[in-house]
Amino acid sequence: MELPGNVQPFAALPLPRLAVQDRVKRQPLKIRLQELYDTADWMDAETAAASEPQQWGNRMRSIRLALITAHGLTNDDTLTVDGLLHLLGMVGSGKSTLYTVLAVYLARQEQRVVIVQSDVASLLQLEEVFESLRRADPRIVAVPLVGRSTRLVHLNRLHVADAGSTLSDKPHPGYRMLSTICPLDGLRQDVDPIPPAEEPCTRLYPIVKGQEGACDCPFLPVCPVHLPTRELASTSIWLATPASLLAARPQAPLIEEEMRYVELAMRHADGILVDEADLVQVQFDDRFAPTEGLVGRYEGWLDRLAQQVMRQIYRPGRPLVGRAKGLD
């Protein structure tokens, strides 16, 4: 593959970066319910023309906060977040509504918040909500954190869920964030496109004799695949699932050091809102304290490792052995 000379302007564009050494100094949050009511009313006013109004104001005013004390429950009109806070409520009590309105409130205060949902479909629904408010307040920008290897699956599901839309409807913002289009495909001679998650973004080698070492793709500043990572530095709302936090990672060189999204969130987020925290805790426990049989009567971890090594030896490009399910 030969890159044409007119790609130089793309390579010269600046890359937004998140400095990993910069840590957020988190401060306790004291938010009066009236402030959240006002935020919910603003959300209703800005989305009044929507086909299905969400009634954020009415939903927020139906929520009551009570603190658990030694003497029982005490009503309170202020939400205080200082460290870890558990929010308990019955099904349908408005916890998700509170999370959404709170995220908008914090974004308008120029603070960064991470929302952890159980599945990608829920994330894309939230992204659509925040995108509808972005036109009224450019500070409300949301980006979903989704691994590159699973994008095609989620993209197909989004097409199915969005099948009822018409050409006159605005396209779902998730299509941009789940893009699998690699600009290098248009310059290759192969008929088959590059599979998702196997793009040679930092593994291009010059054909000039005497030059060694891998090069970064010149399309990184404009590549659709890396749009979510490029927007991390400027977005106020990060949308994630437990799996994406623990397994997915941003692409170098957009991030100075190799790390997973959970590490990035701990460094740069002013707050993390977790829905269904008990289920998320189970996934975190399974990930950080796993039990694995190395050798046994049936297939063990060492057996899977040997099989993966053999597959990678005979595979074009030969990516890292550890980039396989069950071997990270």
Image (spheres, rainbow, N blue to C red):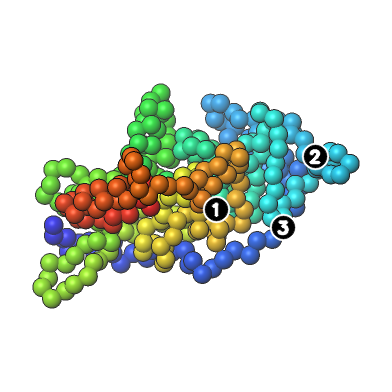
Q: Secondary structure at mark 3?
A: loop
Give the tally of numbered discs.
3
Residue 51: percent from the left, percent from the top? Answer: 53, 26
Q: Secondary structure at mark 1?
A: loop
Q: Is residue 102 left or right of residue 173?
A: right
Q: Which label was assigned to residue 147?
A: none
Q: Is residue 66 above or below residue 258?
A: above
Label 2 sits on residue: 66
Query: Which quadrant would the N terminus be assigned to in this image?
Result: bottom left
Mark 2–mark 3 Cα distance, whole angstroms, equals 19 Å
Which amino acid type is marked by label 1? Ser
Label 3 sits on residue: 28
Residue at (37%, 50%) from the top-left corner?
A: 294
Q: Quadrant of residue 161?
A: top left
Residue 325: percent from the left, percent from the top? Answer: 35, 46
Q: Nearer the viewer, mark 1 or mark 3?
A: 3
